[in-house]
Amino acid sequence: MSDALFNDFQLYLETAQVESINEELKLLGVGCDICRVGRLEYLYEKWGEKIGVRILSPQEMSIWITKKKSIHFLAKRWAGKEAVVKALGLGFRKGLRWREISILNDKNGKPFVQFTGQTKQLLVSDKQQVKCYISLADEEMQALAYCVAFISITPQPSG
């Protein structure tokens, strides 16, 4: 992870208008994105499986293959990851990586966000932990995602 990205995120946390839920839990941001399914159909026709390799984590890629490379699955992940980076107040240009943000489902089908690699190093440490809650929806022509990001900050002993 680059020091510049880490410093940018720390500066953002210091200056962001975050709402305190309590002393240790703060609302970091909210993000929403809508994606035309046709856009992902076009990208899939143009690039084939490479579009999945570019935007999906390895776990998501395995699921996508079992879902017979569903375009709706791709569109929801695209919208979901865009919503996550908006909620975080960062962007993919700042160093977050598509493949290091996974949107998976628990045993009941509820979606959740998991970070890996440099993205996880940026967002999770012994001093802080970012947690994202996400909702996904799709219709025939559109996929929608809504994400709420919280940060819990562990008070450090002074001294």
Image: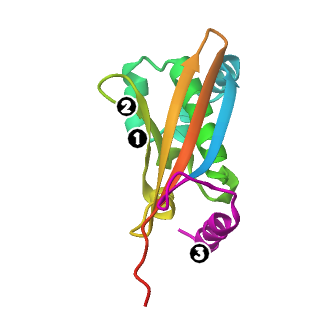
Q: Is residue 27 magenta?
A: no
Magenta-highlighted residues: 1-26
List the residue tagged with mark 1: 58
Label disc, if present, on residue 3 of the rendered structure: 3
Task: Quadrant for the C terminus, please.
Answer: bottom left
| Residue positioned most to the front | 22
Label disc, if present, on residue 22 of the rendered structure: none
Which residue lies at the image location 62% right of the left edge and 59% below the top edge?
95
Residue 149 lies, in percent from the top left, at 55, 46
Please state the total of marks drawn on the protein image: 3
Q: Quick check: 100 above or below 5?
A: above
Q: Quick check: 100 above or below 34?
A: below
Question: Relative to the observer, which residue lies in front, 21 or 54?
Answer: 21
Looking at the rendered structure, the secondary structure element under dot 1 is helix
Q: Residues within 10 Å of mark 3 (few under 14, many from 20)?
A: few
Badges 2 and 1: C-beta atoms under 8 Å apart? yes
Q: Is residue 13 magenta?
A: yes
Residue type at the position of mark 1: Pro
Residue type at the position of mark 3: Asp
| Residue positioned most to the bottom | 159
Whether residue 44 can be seen here: no
Q: Residues within 10 Å of mark 1 (few under 14, many from 20)?
A: some
Which residue lies at the image location 37% right of the left edge and 22% below the top edge?
109
Q: CA distance from mark 2 to mark 1?
A: 6 Å
Residue 44 lies, in percent from the top left, at 61, 24
Is tag 2's residue or tag 3's residue first in the polypeptide sequence?
3
